[in-house]
Image (spheres, grey):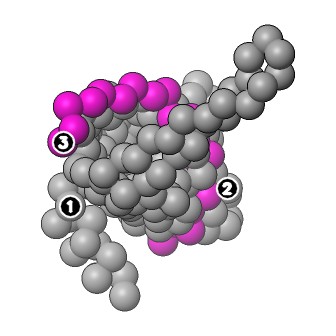
Amino acid sequence: MKKLILILSLVCGTVAIGQTNYNFAVGLRAGETSGLTIKKSIGNGAAIEGIFGAWRYGLSATALFEKYVPVGSVSNLNWYYGAGGHVAVQNNRYYRYYYYDRNRDVYYSDYYYNGGIGLGLDGILGMEYKIPNAPIALSLDIKPFFEVNTHGGAWVSLDPGLGIKVAL
């Protein structure tokens, strides 16, 4: 199973740079981009990370290259920063917006979104703590991204996230 996860992360181009206190980790990230996260240390303070996300209207795959920097004299605590990209696939959506006028009369408008594909550029800045003598790493980060989609739209988000990983 570990080999399969490693192969999937390498195929998706997930690359990171850092001084992690483990060689490989798999876990979950909660945020706007929520889902399975896979991280592999590649030595010299480098690691590779991929986030495979799912939400109500689609799926995404994010690949990040990260650099890890120890936080002063606190062992097992690192800052990390990096960049990468993502691809997102969205399905069809239907919205109904309700609004009121001054007389409290109800109006609504319908909007139908016809799915599509989005491509984006991502950055990441965060802090990670590997619990000593336990195979658990906790992270808190902000992953700003810019995305364009096949409908000509653009999307910008700060995407904060909280992660927990099993470090192997």
State which tag comes first along the sequence, 1 or 3.
1
Pointer 2 local density, CA inside 10 Å: few below 14, some 14–19, many at least 20: some
Determine the image quadrant of residue 140: top right
- The residue labelled by disc 1 is 12
Residue placed farthest to the bottom in the image?
Answer: 1
Is mark 2 in CB contact (under 8 Å) with mark 1? no
The alpha-carbon separation of the residues under discs 1 and 3 comes to: 21 Å
- The answer to which image quadrant residue 108 occupies is top right
Horizontal side of 127 relative to 36 (left or right) equals: right
Q: Residue at x 45, y 34 (%)?
A: 143
Q: Which residue is located at x 57 percent, y 43 percent?
A: 96
Q: Is residue 126 visible?
A: no
Q: Earlier in the sequence, mark 3 or mark 2?
A: 2
Q: Residues within 10 Å of mark 3 (few under 14, many from 20)?
A: few
Report the amino acid beneath label 2. Ile
x, y percentage for residue 37?
44, 60
From the image, give the main secondary structure of the stretch colored magenta.
strand
Outermost residue on the right side: it is: 103
Q: Say which residue label 2 marks.
A: 131
Q: Which element is circle 1 on?
A: loop
Name the secondary structure under disc 2.
Answer: loop
How busy is the neighbourhood of tag 1: few (under 14 within 10 Å), some, or many (20 plus)?
A: some
What kind of residue is marked 3?
Thr
Name the secondary structure under disc 3: loop
Mark in front: 1 vs 3: 3
**Where are the magenta residues, as a range?**
150-168
Q: Say if the magenta span includes residue 159.
A: yes
Name the front one of labels 2 and 1.
Answer: 1
